[in-house]
Image: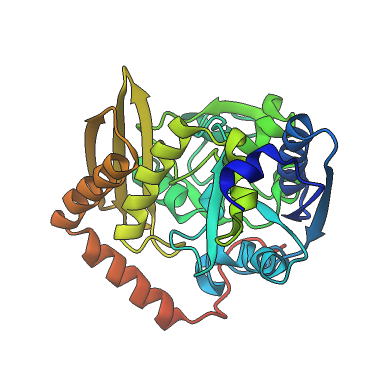
Amino acid sequence: MNSETHSTTPPASITIASRESRLAMWQAEHVRCALHKLYPSCDVKILGMTTRGDQILDRTLSKVGGKGLFVKELEAALADGRADLAVHSLKDVPMELPEGFALGAILEREDPRDAFVSPHYESLEALPAGSIVGTSSLRREAMIRARFPHLDVRPLRGNLDTRLGKLDRGEYAAIILAAAGLKRLGLEARIRALLDPADSLPAAGQGALGIEIRADRADMAAWLAPLHDEATALAVEAERAVSRALGGSCEVPLAAHAVWRDGALHLRGAVSMPDGRRVLRAEETVRSPDLAGALALGKRVSADLEAQGAIDIVNALTTMSRTDGPNTAPSGPKS
């Protein structure tokens, strides 16, 4: 059956695989509602799952296998037929999908910026010297250390509610989170300040939702097509191309963010040392790109970063992580 036939034959049922955190379930429910509007007679279920990334909370992601830990169990459910699709925060999806899987749709992006959250202070600039700032991201850590070397940056793991709870108990003076997650859960009031991308360049795919399917599910790809937002997709594909070319992982503070301006796609990329003492930056623009043009844009930015020495940083941090070993616990407060 071809995709045209699939697209005109509504699905009888669809099962969505999702992590069980409140944010992940919101994302799955968001897709469920969208599918219900498209296919009112379809029985759309959500299969909640706990991933390895959710279970390991006492170590940073770079020490235990990276962001792929959040998607492997969901991919297993797709592979064995327990689920038809999986909903991910796109920034948590590895740059290279395993063989046999594909992104069936990328939804319109929410706010991609980082958010400053604190019960007592209005901004990073207002924090006194020695204040403890929590973040789960080496990218954010490098940004803070580069601009505010007088602050004490410490690891922060757990789902969104867990992180906010640690802040509210006084374990941190402030924490940095993705604005998109707070807004999706109706917690926008917790945001004291939104960080300018010029100061805190977002991660590749931040704020966007990706729907993963088996590559052989042409029927599912056709059913998901109306949910796909091409402008978001081209932007995040350019961003992911930068990370892919540089071997981006949780071990490397790497950022890539693309925005549309008057029909042109403008992409900025950055690679840093975790201490913020060395930051490489590059940017390029392409007018009216298709997918090939977006990918080429990403490659041009990554090539510029490579010419500045990005691969040396990536190799040094990857070697350092392997030397430290997977069981090295970070300093700072425990769960």
Indicate the position of residue 234 as horizontal and vertical percent values: 40, 38
Front position in the image: 189 or 80: 80
Indicate the position of residue 326 as horizontal and vertical percent values: 53, 79
Tell me: residue 313, above or below residue 204.
Answer: below
Front position in the image: 94 or 155: 94
Q: Quadrant of the C terminus?
A: bottom right
**Quarter of image, res 58:** bottom right
Residue at the left extreme of this rendering: 307
Front position in the image: 328 or 51: 51
Front position in the image: 92 or 196: 92
Indicate the position of residue 302 as horizontal and vertical percent values: 24, 51
Indicate the position of residue 110 as horizontal and vertical percent values: 57, 31
The residue that appears at 50% across and 53% down in the rendered structure is 137
The residue that appears at 35% across and 31% down in the rendered structure is 198
Q: How is the image coloured?
A: rainbow
The residue that appears at 40% across and 37% down in the rendered structure is 235
Please indicate, yes or no, whether residue 210 appears anywhere in the rendered image: no
- Say whether residue 218 is left or right of residue 190: left
The residue that appears at 38% across and 38% down in the rendered structure is 257
